[in-house]
């Protein structure tokens, strides 16, 4: 195991928690096997959600709303299915910065509070002014209070990819960096990390309590290096391999070959096994039905694999992409036959967010006419569609039963 960041991580330890000091002390280094099993009592680094529109809490889903032009943190109560402003101040009109819900942007939920990061407001930008800064705020979960934690770098939005209960992790420019939630303190973990490394913010997973970070190296990119990133910001190389691009999940890495077979690599042991060969579908005349490459991700205990219909196939025109779900514990692949008709294509229905009450999906699209005002004041109308979000249980989703419970994100008063 190669220690890349010992010096930086230990410098960081000097000023923070005892728990972090222990983690850095020689002789108590976490073994690879320990990395494999998460410890619920310890804070862990988890990937930032693939879709950041909805941040799932215990019985609520947080989202960004507005009142007039005031940005507000709002939540959908998953029991009543009603949307509210995260404000419990009597008589508050939620229209000024004094409202506890004021703020929003990127939302980070911890057991104690909801943090919001908002990149700089254009109105702060004046000629010759100091560099633009973002704002980190903390909101009490009962909506009673909120305040600004700190002004921080404005460049976090593009790079943030993970969080723990105490920090946000991401890239600032080309550096790997960490932002402490309680103080807004920013630490560069490794300079120029992204200069010769390529990684996808949305293809990260957990490995025990650490973040599993697959990074592509080489020119052309041909080798994947698996790193673990600890809560204290320590980066450790676990393994290198020459693999196709894939998706990590809980210490495993799922990847497909050119023929569409999916394999799974155990990142700790280095052992690769065949996971699914059902998507390698060949026509009687020998033409391959689905190409091997396509997006993969994990939803509710299933590996989701998108497959492109080859252009020469008759159903290409109406259904260019198909989506399959394979249980992680093993079992047959099932095709998601629920549709999201978007831009007249029959797209397979994708999951926007997982919540304890079910999966959030686009249950329907309603045709709307949008009216835009041009610079010269002329009105221009265009046709579009408005998403109607819905909840569906994982069982119904994977069985393609259109059992939707439609959600209303209209804010309730009080
Ligand atoms: Zn308010």
Image (spheres, grey):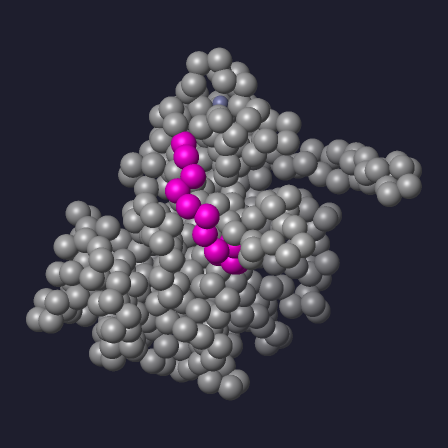
Which residue: 29% across, 39% down?
111
In the image, residue 77 lies at what x, y percent? Answer: 43, 26
Which residue: 54% across, 49% down?
119
Q: Nearer the viewer, residue 104 or 147?
A: 147
Specify the segment rendered in magenta. 146-158
| Image position of 211 (left or right of 362) | left
Q: Specify the quadrant that holds the N terminus.
A: bottom left
Determine the main secondary structure of the stretch shown in magenta.
strand
| Image position of 269 (left or right of 107) | left
Confirm whether residue 296 shows in the render: no
In the image, residue 76 lies at what x, y percent? Answer: 46, 29
Q: Is residue 45 above or below residue 34?
A: above
Residue 332: quadrant of the picture = bottom left
- Residue 150 among magenta residues: yes
Q: Nearer the viewer, residue 243 or 16?
A: 16
Q: Residue furthest front?
A: 128
Which residue: 75% across, 40% down?
384
């Amino acid at each position: 195991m190669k220690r890349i960041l010992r010096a930086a991580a230990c410098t960081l330890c000097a000023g923070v928690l005892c728990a972090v000091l222990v983690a850095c002390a020689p002789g108590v280094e976490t073994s690879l096997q320990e990395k494999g099993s998460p410890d619920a009592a310890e804070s862990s680094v988890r990937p930032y959600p693939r879709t950041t529109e909805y941040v799932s809490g215990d019985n609520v889903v947080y989202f960004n709303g507005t009142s007039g032009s005031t940005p507000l943190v709002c939540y959908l109560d998953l029991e009543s299915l009603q949307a509210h402003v995260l404000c419990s101040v009597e008589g508050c009109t939620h229209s000024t910065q004094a409202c506890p819900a004021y703020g929003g942007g990127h939302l980070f939920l911890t057991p104690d509070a909801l943090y919001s990061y908002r990149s700089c407001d254009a109105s702060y930008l004046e000629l010759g002014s100091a560099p633009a800064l973002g704002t980190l705020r903390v909101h009490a979960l009962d909506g009673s209070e909120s305040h600004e934690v700190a002004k921080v770098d404005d460049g976090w939005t593009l790079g943030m990819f993970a969080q723990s209960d105490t920090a946000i992790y991401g890239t600032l420019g080309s550096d790997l960096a960490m932002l402490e939630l309680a103080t807004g303190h920013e630490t560069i973990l490794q300079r120029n990390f992204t200069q010769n490394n390529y990684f996808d913010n949305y293809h990260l997973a957990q490995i025990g309590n650490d973040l599993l970070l697959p990074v592509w190296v080489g020119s052309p990119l041909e080798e994947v290096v698996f790193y673990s990133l600890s809560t204290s910001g320590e980066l450790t190389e676990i393994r290198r391999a020459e693999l196709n691009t894939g998706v990590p999940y809980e210490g495993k890495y799922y990847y497909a070959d050119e023929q569409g077979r999916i394999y799974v690599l155990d990142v700790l042991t280095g052992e690769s096994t065949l996971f699914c060969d059902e998507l390698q579908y060949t026509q009687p005349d020998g033409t391959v039905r689905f190409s091997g490459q396509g997006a993969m991700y994990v939803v509710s205990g299933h590996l989701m694999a998108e497959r492109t219909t080859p252009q020469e196939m008759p159903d290409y025109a109406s259904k260019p992409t198909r989506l399959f779900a394979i249980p992680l514990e093993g079992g047959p692949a099932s095709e998601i036959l629920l549709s999201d008709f978007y831009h007249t294509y029959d797209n397979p229905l994708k999951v926007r967010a997982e919540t304890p009450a079910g999966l959030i999906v686009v249950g329907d699209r309603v045709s709307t006419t949008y009216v835009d005002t041009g610079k010269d004041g002329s009105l221009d109308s265009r046709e579009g569609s408005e998403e109607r979000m819905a909840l569906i249980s994982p069982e119904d989703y994977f069985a393609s039963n259109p059992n939707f419970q439609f959600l209303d994100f209209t804010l309730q008063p009080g």
